[in-house]
Amino acid sequence: MAKFELIVRGGRVIDPASGLDGVHDVAVKDGTIAQVAPRIAGPAARTVDARNQLVIPGMIDTHGHVYQHVTGDFGMNPDEVGVRSGVTAVVDQGGAAPLTIQGFRKFIKDPAATRVYAFVSNYLVGGLLGHRHVGLYGPHGINVKETINAIGKNRDIVKGIKCHAEIGGYSRWGIETLRLAKEASRAAKVPVYVHLGRLWAEENGTTIDPDSVIDDALPLLEPGDILAHPFTKHPGAFVSREGKVHPLIFEAMARGVRIDVGRGGHMSFNAARIALDAGVMPFTIGSDIHGYTIRRRDVWRMCPSSPSTRTTGRCRTAWAYASRPTSVSGPCSRCARAKCIARSRRCSRSRCPRSRDAPGSVRTLGVAAPGRPRYVQTELRAVQ
Ligand SMILES: [Zn+2]
């Protein structure tokens, strides 16, 4: 009988935990790593030639959205995000809820080849359609007891609580939803993972200082809690209205609050430069991959003259306006509107011949939905 099930031969083994970086063989027995050495004799039931390839410990994606079907277009297949993307374990952030965690276990976690974990949603309903319907996500939709219960019964897969501290929710309910998340987190002894940066538009008639979200949220956090989206272009996150990292971020880092990249739709190179230059170094790299990041509609379908615009929803509209370089003017070539969303979207891209004229640093953020106040913040730099 073979001594090992598998030997991976001759790859460059990089294992930061043990300080290893060199050409080694790796032997597997009973499903675990039995030996790592420059030359392992064997025999093995199976041998893999890994010469000129990297051999690394399984990577963990700390932020995915894999409650497929239950979260609509937003949720992806766990193995598509996991093993088929070179990641052996994926943590779903907030798709599964206290009321739906059993389905997550049976239909997502159990059948997946990837190891699947969850930060259970702070809200009873979880991340349906990427939290599109804001009315579901107030304190009325949170039950601390149910959250604690769900964590207690599913400790093998639930490793924390996913919650939000962002302008739209803050304009409606202040910091109450985060306070409830922390109440459950302390009782269940798991961390919270906090989304920063705009998710929902503000409540009608409300204009708030985005930095006040950080003022109120960060003092609630404890060592081991996690802040997401340090490089987002959205206001109310790491980079303040002054274009600097909010001072409370440093205080939080100093007392052991972790930072996860949460890439998704939250990657501004300007914001990243500001944060990194200020010494903000993420602790983990979560992809925040979800259906909307990889199945974006053709930008032309977001044009107001196109019937399909109706399906794109208010948040996407606001987001498109937020991306509009202020220096670009003139009507859209397709619908002739001066502020065509599709055209604005195009012009924020390097493809557009006019984008070279855009200053690239100062943007006007506007919530453009009819009947809503226009929220303007011209001071904010580095939003794209
Ligand atoms: Zn996410």
Image (spheres, grey):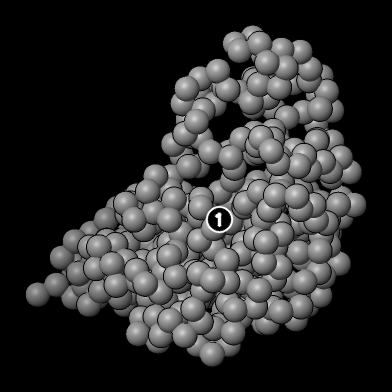
Question: With 195 as the anchor, is 308 left or right in this view?
Answer: left
Q: Nearer the viewer, residue 12 or 342?
A: 342
Question: With 230 as the anchor, is 190 left or right in this view?
Answer: left
Q: Which residue is mark 1?
A: 134
Q: Quadrant of residue 324?
A: top right
> Among all residues in the image, which is located at the extreme bottom?
187
Question: With 116 as the anchor, is 290 left or right in this view?
Answer: right
Amino acid type at mark 1:
Val
> Among all residues in the image, which is located at the extreme left?
1
- Residue 65: x %, y % from top left: 44, 56
Q: Quadrant of residue 279?
A: bottom right
Question: With 97 as the anchor, is 333 left or right in this view?
Answer: right
Q: Nearer the viewer, residue 334 or 241?
A: 334
- Residue 207: x %, y % from top left: 80, 52
**Which residue occupies 32% across, 66% down?**
104
Helix, strand or loop at mark 1: helix
Q: Is residue 81 above or below residue 14?
A: above
- Residue 194: x %, y % from top left: 62, 67
Question: Which quadrant of the rendered structure holds the N terminus?
Answer: bottom left
**Which residue occupies 36% across, 58% down?**
67
- Residue 58 visible, this orientation: no
- Residue 338 visible, this orientation: yes
Determine crowd level at label 1: few under 14, some 14-19, many 20+ residues with C-alpha closer than 10 A.
some
Q: Nearer the viewer, residue 9 or 132?
A: 132
